[in-house]
Every structure is written in C-alpha cells, then in structure tokens.
C-alpha cells in the first residue's frame, strides 16, 4: 500500500504509468509491413533525386503547413502499432509533424530534425493504437517548411489486445522472473544528488517505478560528456587537429570498468540506459565531443553491453525549460546522433528530449511568454531551469518508465 500512496502524489502522467498492465507475457508474434511513400497520398511530388530511398521514390511534400503524406495501413486486429517513419531532412531546421491516426492526433509535433543531407535517411518511431482493418496514418507538418522527405513507414503490429488503461498495477514481483540490474550512465540531469534540494537527477527517482526484481544502479555523474564519463580522468584539455579531445592514457574510467567487470558488473539480462549530449556540446576540451565521435562512443558502449548479454537503451538528452511564447520547446543537441547510433547498433531509443518538453507543455510550464517565475515551474526545476528538484526528477523518471511500456521494451515487464 505504501507504494500506492507515494504514486498518488505524482502528477497525472506519472500516475497513468502505474495504471497500465504489462502485456509482455501475452504479446503475440509481431509482424512488420512496409508501406512505401510512392503508394501513399503525397501532397507534393514523388521524387527520386536523392539516393538511399527504398522502392521507387519518396514523398517530397509541398513546403507548407498541412501538406501531408497519408498512408493506409491494414491490420488484422485492433492493438498497438509501432511505426518507424523513414525520412531525410537536408536542412538544419527541424520539420515537426503531427501524426493523425484515423483523424485523431496521436502524436504532436514529432521531431524530424536535420539528418545532415537529403540523402541521409533516419528513422523516427512512434507508437499508437490502431483499429482492426483499414487505418489512415497522416503525417501533417506543423510549420511552413512542410514535411521532411518521407521514404516509407515500417508498421509493426501485435495482435494481442492493447493494455487496459484501468487494470490495477502489479505491485508484487512476478514469480519466476529473473532479477535484473538497471544500470544508468549519464550526466547531472540523471545523477544522484550530492546534498541539498538541487540538483536531483531523474535516475535517483527511477527505482520507485520498478518491482523488487529490478535494482537500479545509478552511475550518472554531473558535468560529464559521454567521453569524460567513459575515460575520466584521462580526457585532456587539448584538442587535436580533427577537433576531438586528446585522451591520454587511453584507459577507461573506474566507473565504466566497474560495469564491465566480469564478476560484479553487467550480467546477462541487465539493462544499461545511456543519456548524454548536454555537456558534450561544450566547444572546449575536456568536455567537447564531435558528432561522429559521439555516435562512435554510443556504439562502443552498446557493443560492450551486448557482449555481456545485457541490453543497451539510448535516450536523447532531457530538455531544460525554454519557452517560445506559451509553448515549451526543445533545446538540446545530439538528437540525430543518438537516433543514428540507435539505428546503426540496433538499440532502442527513448526520445526523452521530446517527451520532456511535451510534459512541460502538458503541465503548463510556459504560461506567459517565458516568464519562468510564473506557474508551477519553480517546484519542478532548480533556479537554473535546467536541473530538477526531486519532484521534477520523479516525473521525468515516470516519463521514462512510461516510454518503456509504450515502446514495448522488455524491461517494462519489471515495472510496477
Ligand atoms: C530541396 C530538396 C527536396 C526537399 C526540399 C525541401 O528542394 O531537393 O527533396 O523536399 O528541398 O526543402 O523540402
Ligand atoms: Ca519538400
């Protein structure tokens, strides 16, 4: 009962997390079907001038708000669809789009950030309920730049019923389930507090969402880039001619060695959640990490985790609070890099950047044109509007827990 009382104090979104049942055990075999843009309705032209697309072309939507691409997707039964949207955006400006399923907005302003060039394709994944039979999935651009170029949708459905939103939480550990450790690697937005009310990282508040079969081990450290986290104290203040920080000697940090330790480190079935990309954008060494290097290091971590039979999960960096008028907007980099590394290494990615500023909008954090002192922002963020107080950290942890369920990441079987 104690856990229910604690959860009762968490805001609506986090409470909803606790009210969803785990469906892993009953999920039927999933099937993925590709729907090419050339067979969809494209408000624009089907082009083939940028290589790397699948099929015979891609949808180059008219550059305008509402110039949509619409796919008709057929599913055998009602349930949940996980939809990978392949796209390219050769500009440096994001091209957000709403996702409407059968006319209902299921995801707002999904980010289709720059991919580096029009011939560099990336995949953005969204999850939503679908009906049995025919469903329309419309990508509706919300800015005057229109859609990114759209190549296809990969639609994965399971024929199991979607989780009931009203089923009671399973507060007790599932019998026979192996115990796992949920390891965390990240920066100050994830780290345990060092004392005082600020800052408290969301990793510090994560354990309350899990049953006793999962143990959270938070190895996030304030001020770290992915590279300094991996190589402390050996990343120097010297930048080499390629623009990367010199590491000398090239020896891993004790924290990463501890995770790799054969006896006490990651074991088969464990998880490692990795969230960097905030300190990495510093222009100077030792924190600076370039785009390619960031992707490379995510790949190194993923490979080491997988080699131990454990499961990496990447997260885009949690957003600070930035108001554009009355809307909270994103303010972090390394989004494309995280998604690219996820695709390249077959690792699930939780888009915590988008999920966090979406939460800030849900909570009404931008009431009057960027006056951060107004409204409920104060109890959520530290005075720097970047780090969290415990209440904010708890809600961000709840967002991550909900994403585990929504994205059907198997660790969700350990959620309360
Ligand atoms: C260029 C590019 C198109 C793209 C367009 C845009 O014209 O060749 O593929 O759709 O820019 O900005 O939308
Ligand atoms: Ca276009």
Image (cartoon, rainbow, N blue to C red):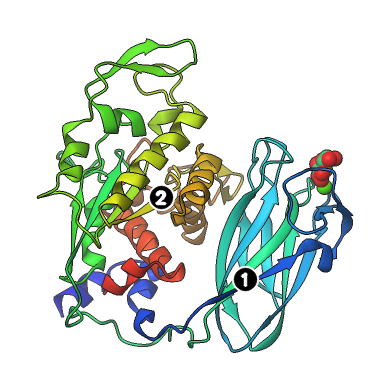
Quadrant of the drawing holding the N terminus: bottom left
Residue situated furthest right in the rendering: 45
Left or right of 323: which side holds 229? Answer: left
Residue closer to the observer: 202 or 264: 264
Q: Is residue 393 above or below residue 9?
A: above
Q: Please name the residue that numbered disc 1 is placed on.
A: 155
Mark 2, Cα crowd under 10 Å, few <14 / some 14-19 / many 20+, is: many
Q: Position of residue 218 (x, y in %)?
A: 21, 48
Q: Which mark is residue 314?
A: 2
Q: Is residue 288 above or below residue 355?
A: above
Left or right of 317: which side holds 367? Answer: right
Residue situated furthest front in the rendering: 307
Q: Which mark is residue 40?
A: none
Q: Is residue 43 visible?
A: yes
Mark 1, Cα crowd under 10 Å, few <14 / some 14-19 / many 20+, is: many
* Residue appearing at x 65%, y 40% in the figure: 114
Q: Tag 1, which secondary structure?
A: strand
Q: Tag 2, which secondary structure?
A: strand
Q: Quadrant of residue 110?
A: bottom right
Give the quarter the ligand 1 occupies.
Answer: top right
Q: Position of residue 262 (x, y in %)?
A: 14, 47
Q: Is residue 386 visible?
A: no
Q: How many marks?
A: 2
Q: Position of residue 58 (x, y in %)?
A: 80, 55
* Residue appearing at x 63%, y 66% in the figure: 154
Residue closer to the observer: 393 or 214: 214
Q: Is residue 108 above or below residue 30?
A: above
Residue closer to the observer: 198 or 401: 401
* Residue appearing at x 27%, y 69% in the figure: 9
Confirm or reject: label 2 Cβ below 8 Å from ligand 1: no
Along the polypeptide, which appears first: circle 1 or circle 2? Answer: 1
Tell me the distance, in whole angstroms, between the alpha carbons under discs 1 and 2: 21 Å
């Amino acid at each position: 009962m104690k856990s229910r009382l604690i959860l009762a104090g968490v805001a609506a979104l986090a409470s909803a997390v606790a009210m969803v049942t785990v469906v892993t055990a009953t999920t039927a075999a999933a099937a993925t079907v590709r729907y090419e843009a050339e067979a969809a309705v494209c408000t624009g032209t089907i082009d083939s001038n940028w290589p790397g697309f699948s099929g015979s072309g891609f949808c180059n939507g008219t550059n305008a708000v509402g110039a949509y691409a619409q796919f008709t997707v057929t599913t055998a039964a009602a349930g949940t669809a996980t939809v990978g949207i392949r796209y390219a955006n050769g500009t440096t400006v994001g091209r957000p789009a709403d996702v409407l399923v059968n006319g209902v907005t299921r995801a707002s302003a999904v980010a289709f950030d720059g991919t580096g060039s029009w011939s560099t394709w990336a995949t953005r994944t969204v999850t939503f309920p679908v009906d049995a039979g025919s469903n329309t999935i419309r990508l509706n651009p919300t800015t005057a730049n229109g859609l990114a170029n759209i190549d296809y949708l990969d639609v994965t459905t399971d024929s199991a019923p979607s989780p009931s939103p009203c089923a009671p939480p399973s507060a007790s550990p599932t019998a026979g389930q192996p115990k796992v450790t949920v390891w965390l690697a990240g920066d100050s937005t994830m780290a345990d507090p060092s004392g005082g009310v600020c800052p408290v990282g969301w990793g510090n508040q994560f354990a309350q969402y899990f049953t006793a079969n999962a143990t959270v081990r938070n190895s996030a450290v304030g001020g770290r880039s992915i590279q300094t986290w991996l190589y402390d104290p050996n990343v120097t203040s010297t930048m080499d001619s390629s623009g990367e920080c010199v590491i000398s000697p090239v020896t891993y940090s004790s924290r990463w060695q501890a995770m790799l330790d054969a006896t006490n480190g990651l074991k088969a079935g464990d998880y490692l959640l990795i969230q960097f990309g905030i300190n990495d954008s510093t222009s100077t060494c030792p924190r600076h990490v370039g785009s390619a290097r960031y992707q490379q290091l995510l790949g190194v971590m993923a490979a080491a985790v997988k080699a131990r039979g454990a499961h990496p999960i990447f997260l885009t960096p949690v957003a600070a609070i930035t108001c554009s008028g009355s809307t909270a907007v994103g303010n972090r980099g390394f989004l494309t890099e995280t998604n690219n590394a996820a695709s390249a290494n077959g690792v699930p990615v939780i888009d915590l950047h988008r999920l966090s500023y979406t939460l800030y909008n849900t909570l009404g954090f931008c009431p009057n044109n960027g006056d951060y002192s107004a409204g409920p922002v104060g109890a959520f963020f530290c005075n720097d509007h970047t780090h969290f107080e415990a209440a904010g950290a708890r809600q961000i942890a709840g967002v991550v827990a909900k994403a585990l369920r929504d994205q059907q990441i198997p660790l969700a079987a350990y959620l309360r």
